[in-house]
Image (spheres, coloured by chain):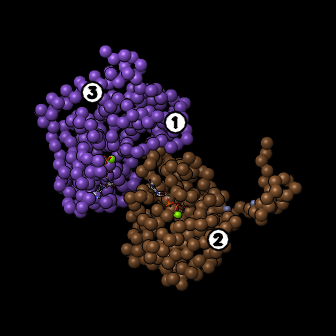
Chain colours: A purple, B brown
Amino acid sequence: MHKLIICGGNDKYGNSEGIQRLDLFRGELYTIVGNTGSGKSRLMKDIEQLADHDTVTQRRVFIDGKQFTWEERQEQSLHFVAHLGQNMRFMLDTTVEEFLNLHAHCRAKEVDTNEIIFQANQITPEAIMPNQSLNLLSGGQTRALMIADIALICDSPIVLIDEIENAGIDKEKAFALLLSKEKLVMIVTHDPHTALMAKQRIVMEAGAIKQVIQRSEKEAAIFEQLSKEYRKQKRLQNAIRNGEGVI
Amino acid sequence: MLKKVILISGGAAVGKTAVLKNIIPLLQSKDIALSVCKIDCVATKDGLVYENMGIPSVVGISGDICPDHFLVSNLPELYHWADEKTSDILLIETAGLCHRCSPATEKMTAGCVLDCTSSCQAPAQLGPMLTYADFVVLTKIDMVSQAEREIILWKIKDLNPSAKLFTIDGLTGYGAEGLADWLGGLSKEENFDDDILRHSMPSGVCSYCVGEKRVGSVYQQGVVGKIEF
Ligand SMILES: Nc1nc2c(ncn2[C@@H]2O[C@H](COP(=O)(O)OP(=O)(O)OP(=O)(O)O)[C@@H](O)[C@H]2O)c(=O)[nH]1
Ligand SMILES: Nc1ncnc2c1ncn2[C@@H]1O[C@H](COP(=O)(O)OP(=O)(O)OP(=O)(O)O)[C@@H](O)[C@H]1O
Ligand SMILES: [Mg+2]
Ligand SMILES: [Mg+2]
Ligand SMILES: [Zn+2]
Ligand SMILES: [Zn+2]
């Protein structure tokens, strides 16, 4: 797979979408911004489901320009797209290790569960244990494990993440893990630092893609500045969390 | 003439009505005349939902009887009723509380609805309802991680490799189209006489079935099962 093509549909009021065609490429990072309710999560879902005129937005989504039958879409969407939704939680009543083995088994893969847990623990400060109960993980641990699972077990070339900032996980390490795998990554965010991380950002309004903005030189410089501040804040946060004084 | 009977079974609150609400308009748009029956134990508001959708509907309340046994006892009358309403397809939503029984018959198109959040723990618990199904619908896919969804789908395929699998988001209706297309395919007129259950129903006639309240071996008659220690 090389690229993902989104063909515009309608906004919430039935007007046709500002952008009629959008080509997104593998190995690139895109961020999605817009007010609350502007349709960011909906766009993620359309992509996950390889929408074909059959969602509220009337969008169509193609992979490499290929047209899939409805049946193929149900089969293929899980292989092409890994989606970490805004409200997803773990429900299975099993241990972390058992879950990872089960998932790998479904995908007919051999994996080193310790490596996946190790990677997840780089992202979250509270360590996840292999024999911990899956549905008792904290919000941050859940998110971290889902990210490590997507990076190391799912072969999906497309990765969709709906908000990464919550629950105090280390987003820079999370991105590093995801981006190291030659994937097409799309991230929904309200955070200016995350938004400016991508060379292209997609702006949503009233349920439609309003425009796609290329990051300017100036914005790249602002991004560097925000990165420094992010790291500084991270240090302070850690110090305070660990009960240390802040001078 | 009635051409098809579609059974929608599944545990409580898994989204059976949500699935039907999504596929009914799609089937209607194919010029298929529908009627629907909801079976429940005590009371249900589902009948009203279907009535509001403008299709002939009937509710059967099973009371003290196993709702699946109750449904089978009423099948010939139901088929007759749907026929009188000149329906092409009769949809039946079960109460689905008794996982030992499956009211699926040979002539029905039998489906089992599971949701990602509850039924997923152990689809094996669903017994004949799942293993004898022609199609399986997985709902509430919006609520769990993708990895778990993959695991659930894989478990279902393992338990019933021949069933057609559909995933549906009952709130937005995503996936309903595929199911409606598959269900809407009608063959010739079908004859529903001499129908037969796919799986025999366990007998459940002990003293408590008929109103006994006192606890103790002396009060237990009929088919009594005991735990082995
Ligand atoms: N998030 C989510 N909720 C759903 C979905 N499908 C159904 N629900 C909700 O789950 C609840 C139960 O849905 P119903 O369709 O009434 O379930 P049912 O199986 O018909 O229930 P009974 O007839 O009472 O056994 C409702 O609150 C629905 O809105 C889904 O795909 N996603
Ligand atoms: N083009 C559209 N047509 C009709 N409805 C739409 C459209 N786009 C989005 N919606 C609906 O609008 C609602 C809000 O959209 P969504 O959840 O995607 O917002 P969001 O940008 O993710 O908000 P938040 O930042 O709060 O998460 C949803 O119910 C969604 O289905
Ligand atoms: Mg959202
Ligand atoms: Mg119902
Ligand atoms: Zn029963
Ligand atoms: Zn009894």
Discs 2, 1: same chain: no
Dot 1: few (<14), some (14–19), or many (≥20) neighbours within 10 Å? some
- Front position in the image: B165 or A33: A33
Q: CA distance from mark 2 to mark 1?
A: 42 Å
Q: CA distance from mark 3 to mark 2?
A: 65 Å
Q: Quadrant of residue A17?
A: bottom left
Image disc number at residue B171: none
Label 1 secondary element: helix
Quadrant containing the C terminus of chain B is top right
> Which residue is the site of mark 1?
A136
The residue located at (57%, 81%) in the rendering is B81
Mark 3 is on which residue type? Tyr
Dot 3: few (<14), some (14–19), or many (≥20) neighbours within 10 Å? some
Label 3 secondary element: helix
Label 3 vs 1, first from the N-terminus = 1
Residue B116 seen in the current view? yes
> Which residue is the site of mark 2?
B72
Mark closer to the observer (3, 2): 3
Whether label 3 touches label 1, CB < 8 Å: no
- Expressed as whole percent of the image width and height from the top left, the position of residue A87 reads 40, 45
Name the chain letter of the residue that bears numbered label 2.
B
Say if B99 sits above or below B143 in the image: below
Dot 2: few (<14), some (14–19), or many (≥20) neighbours within 10 Å? some
Label 2 secondary element: helix
